[in-house]
Image (cartoon, helix red, strand yellow):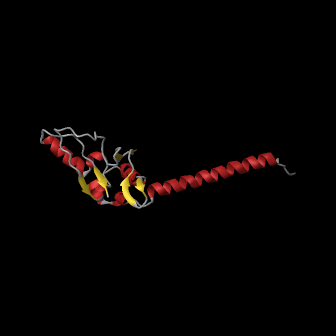
């Protein structure tokens, strides 16, 4: 005795089976990207006491950082991620007014990736932010809080 299954049921089962396979492959690829794909900070001793998910987020934010031109390392403005904020001037850090009041110092720190804070867990843990904190703790009369960094 043989049981005949309609073509409609066979087609439906085939589609469901195909969706299960696609979802499985998608899960494997996303897991591979998250756990295996090269992220140098994830294996660095400097990050051994940091939450692994935060280190992965740092890697993803740096990977998805956008630039003005492909061959020029100049940040596109208004990018806001978990660990990196680029203001409207393309500088890492918070917004600041372009018109400088008379009682304000503006200090620009120029440098490479370490000045920019590649691998920093937030905008508050970059070298320019530490300089800002030092100026704030010294109670210097002229200040604006407009420290930021540009990576060239």
Q: Nearer the viewer, residue 135 or 14?
A: 135
Tell me residue 4's x, y (percent): 84, 49
**Vertical order, 54 against 38 (above or below):** above
Q: Nearer the viewer, residue 80 or 22?
A: 80
Residue 92 visible (yes or no): yes
Residue 117 visible (yes or no): no
- Give the farthest residue toward the right: 1
Tell me residue 11's x, y (percent): 76, 49
Label tally: 0
Which quadrant holds the C terminus?
bottom left
Looking at the image, which residue is at 12% across and 41% down? 140
Looking at the image, which residue is at 30% across and 46% down? 123
Tell me residue 76's x, y (percent): 39, 50
Looking at the image, which residue is at 54% across and 55% down? 28
Taking the image as shown, residue 114 lies to the left or right of residue 6, namely left
Taking the image as shown, residue 14 lies to the left or right of residue 125, namely right
Q: Nearer the viewer, residue 8 or 66?
A: 66
Looking at the image, which residue is at 70% across and 49% down? 15
């Amino acid at each position: 005795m043989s049981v005949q299954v309609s073509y409609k049921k066979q087609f439906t089962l085939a589609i469901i089976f195909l969706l299960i396979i696609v979802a499985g492959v998608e899960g494997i690829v996303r897991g591979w990207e998250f756990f295996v794909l090269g992220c140098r900070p994830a294996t660095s001793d400097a990050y051994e006491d940091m939450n692994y998910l935060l280190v992965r987020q740092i890697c993803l934010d740096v990977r998805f950082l956008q630039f003005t031109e492909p061959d020029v390392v100049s940040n596109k403005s208004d990018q806001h991620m978990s660990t990196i904020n680029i203001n409207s001037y393309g500088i890492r850090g918070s917004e600041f007014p372009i018109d400088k009041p008379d009682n304000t110092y503006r200090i620009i720190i120029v440098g490479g990736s370490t000045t920019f804070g590649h691998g920093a867990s937030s905008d508050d843990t970059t070298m320019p932010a530490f300089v800002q904190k030092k100026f704030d703790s010294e109670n210097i009369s002229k200040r604006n809080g407009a420290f930021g960094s540009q990576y060239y």
